[in-house]
Image (cartoon, coloured by chain):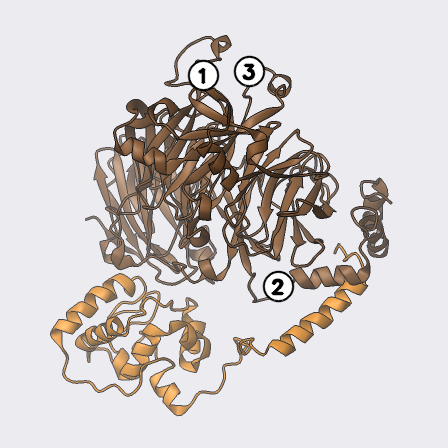
Amino acid sequence: MTIPLPSRAVPTVLLVLVIACAGGEGEAPPPEAPPDAPDRLTAVEIEQGLGPIRDLQLADVDAELAALGETAFTTKCSACHRIDSRFVAPALGDVLARRRPEFVMNMILNADEMVRRHPAVRELLAEFYTPMPTQVRDPEEARAILEFLRSVQTASLSPGEPTGDR
Amino acid sequence: MRRRSNGALYSLAAGLAAATVGIFACQSGRGPAVGAGDMASAAQAVYVAPGEYDEFYAFMSGGFSGQLTVMGLPSGRLLKQVPVFSQYPENGWGYSEETKAMLETSYGFVPWDDAHHPELSMTDGVPDGRWIFINGNNTPRVARVDLSTFETVEILEIPHSAGNHGSPFITPNSDYLVASTRFSVPVPNRDMSIEEYKGNFKGTLSFVRANDPGNMSIAFQILMPGYDYDLAHAGKGPSDGWMFFTSYNTEEEHTLLEVTASRRDKDFVAAVNYRRAEECVAAGAGRDMPADYRHNYFNEHHIAVSDRETSVRVIEPSDCSDLVYFLPTPKSPHGVDVDPTGEYIVAGGKLATVIPVHSFSRMIDAIAAEDFEEVIDEIPVLRYESILAGEVENAGLGPLHTEFDGRGFAYTTAFITSEIVKWEIGSWQVVDRIPVYYSVGHLMIPGGDSAEPWGRYLIALNKITKDRYLPTGPELAHSAQLIDISGERMRLLLDFPTQGEPHYAQGIAAELVMDNQVQFYSLDDNTHPHATKSPAEARVVREGNVVHVYMTSIRSHFTPDNVEGIRVGDEVHFHVTNLEQDWDVPHGFAAMGANTSELLIMPGETRTLVWNPTRPGIYPFYCTDFCSALHQEMQGYARVSPRDADVPLRWGTGGEWQTR
């Protein structure tokens, strides 16, 4: 049984006040899109992901940077990601054949929004169930992880192999 | 209809419509008459819309819970329980290997205390939001809570004290907090007849260096006559450098104090010139007395350690002239409160009919003129009339505590008449009063004991609840009441229940605390010797009959989540590192049959649960803090074999077994 409020007049007044406040302040953040209705993304966002990284210029793989990235990967990513096989999350040995490097870095740095809004990531969530957490906030660390992933991309995984990602 | 009548309850059970009528009728039957318009206005004043924040943090002592409760004002919403002096199975405080040492004392492990007075750190006499301190009464201690993590980070035991009630009141720049003993005892404590109290039992006033986290220490203790020392407050502005302590039982009685300690017309406020004490100590006055007490703190690995201290500097008024003066104060004073200007010292005489207000400047003049009534144990007693600024008459019965609004008014609780009395500083006239429900002890205005109060809200901390809420058997949550003091008349806004006994409270503007929050601990900075900083480091190591499980947790699995090779008689240490690096993702850990609580491990942190398996079998462990859609999948198994089994040690996650 629901315990009613002491007076019918009070909730009515409260409701009016709430509406008045919400309308009057104008500071309330825009409501989040419901999780089953991602908003429409631009072509660039679809391709490069949502986040701070755009239009990377990549040189040859920097082995020193990749080594730093491997350390970070081991600590912050390897609980779920393997290079050569599907684990809790997709294998990453061929990720750069499927995703642009900007997408990879935005996924690392801005996982929450990517999971919430990017259709490709939402499809992954539907398959893997575990949303990727944000583990890295430093763009340089994310860049190092990208370099590590570049260094381990392998041709041995052919498209269609069951890595879990498409 | 009275609220306690059974009619209200029956009508609740009878149905919705009847309940509406019943409760409405009941509410109109108690407390002040409040019209629908006033109720709506009060509701608006305390309404914090979904997603919005409160204006103030309120820190309510847990009293006999030993903890600290954090609430929002004006909503009265519960934000957090911070465990301090009592074990707290909800997050493993005092159970996990990393926190047990915080509750060590010279008496061994003490899992509980009675925590009365939260006290915010201050800069220039104003709360600064760095730390909040709180006292342990029963086994005398003071604790520091870090307000960037809302975690107790340091506890110092107070030697030569018994009943650390008058504590931990702080000086305007947090140089010292004080700890005055409620019970006088032999110093050093020893076996003797209780009847030999007079002259043999002593009180101590301790000054604790508070400004250096992890390094609280006792600068000095002042050995005083054997009274009961009750509460304290520091001077500020002109009275900066002085600390004021109330005392009662100046009769020095040891039995039936209810009668025997109420005989004298006046007891004392002890005014201590602590800058003078510093000079005397620096000049070598007093002596280092052997003592046995503990200092507990987190080391650089965020693991609590307990250091044993063996000495404390003790000075007596006879060692140091001009150190202490007694201000006669009627009758058995309880609270002592200094107004925002620092000129007025208000003492609430529990049994007095007026509130005496002492003048600091008149006190200084009287000292200069040596206008003394008598001298007790080399402590001059000033003449009441010479130091009095005024007496507030008709201030209710049983005045206890006073806080200030910064606009020239003071607010005093009257316990016996259950009311708060507002009076004007200077004219000493009562200008307003409001009943509270029931038997109010302390009150709290955010910053109301500081140089700059946020004089908008007042909370009455009531001792008796009776009929204020739906009844819950013999024991009821203590009641707090929020009162709007922004206008000429006080206005009751809200009742809300509290945890334990919210004996005293502190409040601070939200922005001084909320912007400094730690959201998670950096894994890179985790130097715990048993940290597992990646799944690749996860492993199980046997050292004799001690088995260390180096485990990681991340949404939503443990590594390893299968362990074999544990034997009956082993002592298993689960060292769980939470690899998450995001806000609000703690993971829990619990193992079936463990004779301890769960662990709650913050992101980036390592915590250890010790488990002593006693029977062979398969033992599940799991994450207790709902962490993701697959939280219920976050589980694992430990296999326990007989004592003499030779099952090899192996572990893994995802079907990949490892043995080294």
Q: Which residue is rendered at x = 20% and y = 69% of the image?
A: A69
The answer to whether marks 1 and 2 sit on the same chain is: yes
| Mark 1, other Cα within 10 Å: few <14 / some 14–19 / many ≥20 | many
Q: Nearer the viewer, mark 3 or mark 2?
A: 3
Please tell me the numbered disc located at residue B48. 2
Direction from residue B64 to residue B141 in the image, left or right = left
Q: Is residue B273 above or below residue B634?
A: above
The answer to whether marks 3 and 2 sit on the same chain is: yes
Direction from residue B229 to residue B278 in the image, left or right = left
User: Marks 3 and 1, Cα distance to the nearest angstrom?
Assistant: 10 Å
Q: Nearer the viewer, residue B580 or B109?
A: B109
User: Marks 3 and 2, Cα distance to the nearest angstrom?
Assistant: 51 Å
Label 3 or label 1, whichever comes before in sequence order? 1
Quarter of the N terminus of chain B within the rendering: top right
Q: Is residue B92 above or below residue B158?
A: below
User: Marks 1 and 2, Cα distance to the nearest angstrom?
Assistant: 52 Å
| Mark 3, other Cα within 10 Å: few <14 / some 14–19 / many ≥20 | some
Q: Amino acid at mark 2?
A: Val
Q: Position of residue B425 (x, y in %)?
A: 62, 48
Q: Which residue is mark 1?
A: B201
Q: Amino acid at mark 3?
A: Glu
Q: Colour of chain B?
A: brown
Q: Which residue is mark 3?
A: B253
Q: Position of residue B317 (x, y in %)?
A: 38, 25
> Could you tell me which chain the residue with mark 2 belongs to?
B
- What is the residue that sits farthest to the front in this orientation? B369
